[in-house]
Amino acid sequence: MDWFPLYNSLRIAAISTVIVFFLGIAGAYYVARTPRLVKGLLDVVLTLPLVLPPTVVGYLLLLLLGPRRPLGSWFIERFGLRLTMQWWSAVFATTVVAFPLMYRTARGAFESFDETLAQAGRTLGLGNAYIFWRIRMPVCRQGILAGVVLTFARALGEYGATAMVAGYTPGRTATISTTVYQLWRTNEDALAFRWVAVNLAISAGVLLALNLLERKAVKPWH
């Protein structure tokens, strides 16, 4: 059994989770502080990948990153770098698809934050960066952790956009999801079920870890 799809899926999910964490936190923090009208418009734009079919997201990414498109052709001419059909091309797809999950959960956590805590910190002479990382983030940690776990799980199981942008090449771009589909197409049900079981085990483990973190009385970050 070739374990490359597992390794590839985990590194793609891990990289995209780190990217989405910072982008989602930044987007959520900014949108939560904007006026209601602007917030509504931005919310629609930033949440759109959550409701679009993954194949539509993949198609839009191909229009942007394809070798015959302006951005894709510029990277090829400038750096000799193809942005599609590489293992890391899947990071683009999983980042876009998983971003709304981190954004929505983080925004909800920030909107429920008691601003009097931040005001108290300012009266003590604390800077905005210190208040954000040492006060706001610890208080909102449950929503942040939920967003991280949901992002990782979504990135790990992504198929539609990943298949269109990165394709399926054994030993190069194959992920668990694309491998399961290819095995199903070739009637290799026993091997496909093994990969399904691996994916289920990882997803269940991640969700279990989240439940344990939520139940444990964690002290604020220092």
Image (cartoon, rainbow, N blue to C red):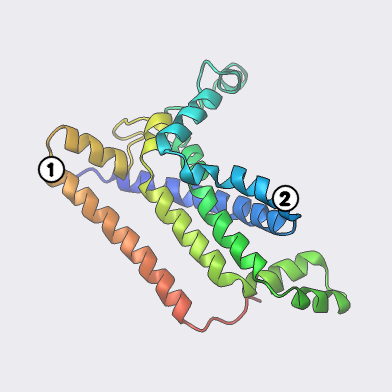
Picture disc at residue 37: 2
Where does the image place residue 118, in percent across and percent down from the top left?
77, 73
Residue neighbourhood size for the residue with mark 2, other residues' Cα within 10 Å, grouped as few (<14), some (14–19), many (≥20): few
The residue pinned by badge 1 equals 189
Amino acid beneath label 2: Leu
Which residue occupies the foreground of this view, 205 or 172? Answer: 205
Residue in the image at 63% along x and 75% along y: 139
Considering the image in quadrants, where does the C terminus appear?
bottom right
Residue in the image at 46% along x and 37% along y: 88
Where does the image place residue 105, in percent across and percent down from the top left?
55, 61
Where does the image place residue 169, in percent across and percent down from the top left?
31, 30
Q: How many callouts does the rendering have?
A: 2
Indicate which disc, 2 or 1, sits on the residue closer to the N terminus: 2
Name the quadrant containing residue 186.
top left
Tags 2 and 1 touching, CB below 8 Å: no
Question: Up-down: is 142 above or below 2?
Answer: below
Picture disc at residue 92: none
Residue in the image at 67% along x and 72% along y: 113
Where does the image place residue 22, in percent across and percent down from the top left?
62, 54
Measure how far apart labels 2 and 1 are at the Cα level.
Answer: 51 Å
SS for dot 1 = helix
Q: Nearer the viewer, mark 2 or mark 1?
A: 2
Question: Up-down: is 37 above or below 74?
Answer: below
Which residue occupies the foreground of this view, 61 or 92? Answer: 61
Residue neighbourhood size for the residue with mark 1, other residues' Cα within 10 Å, grouped as few (<14), some (14–19), many (≥20): few
Considering the image in quadrants, where does the N terminus appear?
top left
Question: Up-down: is 29 above or below 42?
Answer: below
Extreme residue toward the front, this view = 37
Residue in the image at 43% along x and 30% along y: 165
Asked if residue 161 can be seen in this view, the reply is no
Amino acid beneath label 1: Asp
